[in-house]
Image (cartoon, rainbow, N blue to C red):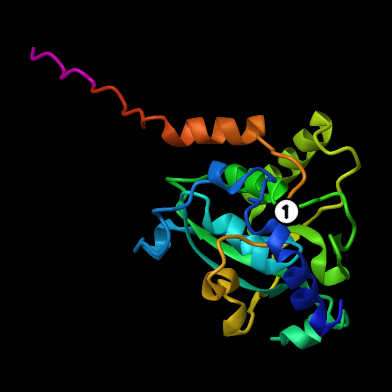
Amino acid sequence: MKWIGKFGWCAAIMGLWLTVSCNGEPDAATPKTNTSLNTKVDPMKTRQATFAAGCFWGVEVAFRKVPGVISTDVGFTGGNPDAKDPTYRQVCTGRTGHAEAVLVTYDPTKVSFPELLDAFWTCHDPTTMNRQGPDVGTQYRSAIFFHDAEQETAARASLKEVEASGVFRRSIATEIVAATPFYKAEDYHQQYFEKEGTAESCHVGIANVHTQLAKEAAQNRAAPTTQPATQPAAASR
């Protein structure tokens, strides 16, 4: 869409969607706080994930609610190699090839990548190609940018499970591709709705997704670490 697109349609329907959470349920059903946000965690013990799901203002809101998410940045990724550090206006032309995306930094002891995938599927419509609501263009495509082989495996397994579940009536159009350089967007885009003092965003999903993959990952994360049994001392001769 053109530069005015994001501002225009968000403003037009804000009154309808301000009290709607990412999963389409009333806002009261969604946790208001994520105590992990902005906490100090050893960077060596954190992980990152990158998601594109339409307007990055709303996607950021969704992930900042997930317990275990430490911080988020909105920006652009997946574009032409020659189009480095693009501006928002440049990305809006569609010529740079970038997607609006959110870089999520999280504590893997509090949330797993498969659980973040559930939040991703829930917060948008992954069945529309290069579109979310009135926002149309390749910059609004649905994509998971994996950072390593483990994330790729989990993303593909999650997509397969979601497809098989039939929770979405149409085929999923989400791309699963390797992460490329992420360029942070201008400051005014960061935590946009919080800066504007609005309680919610104009980003709405169409289904609640709870995969078995995420459930098992959560159980494994919560399970106590098993210590090796102490071997009895050798008897003296």
**Horizontally, is 7 left or right of 63 in the view?**
right
Q: Residue furthest front?
A: 15
Residue 130, image quadrant: bottom right
Q: Amino acid at mark 1?
A: Val
Quick one: 193 or 97, which is closer to the camera?
A: 193
**Horizontally, is 2 left or right of 59 in the view?**
right
Image location (x, y in percent) of residue 226: 35, 28
Quickly name the residue at label 1.
204
What's the residue at 57%, 30% (across, down)?
A: 216
Quick one: 134 or 216, which is closer to the camera?
A: 134
Image location (x, y in percent) of residue 100: 73, 71
- Does the magenta portion include 232? yes
Q: Residue furthest left?
A: 236
What's the residue at 57%, 67% (across, down)?
A: 198
Q: Is residue 119 above or below residue 231?
A: below
What's the residue at 42%, 34% (across, down)?
A: 222
Q: Quadrant of the C terminus?
A: top left
Q: Which residues are magenta?
A: 231-237
Residue 83 seen anywhere in this rendered image of the structure: no
Q: Main secondary structure of the magenta part?
A: loop
Q: Residues within 10 Å of mark 1 (few under 14, many from 20)?
A: many
- Does the magenta portion include 222? no
Q: Quadrant of the N terminus?
A: bottom right
**Horizontally, is 228 left or right of 129 in the view?**
left
**Horizontally, is 16 left or right of 64 in the view?**
right
Image location (x, y in percent) of residue 77: 72, 72
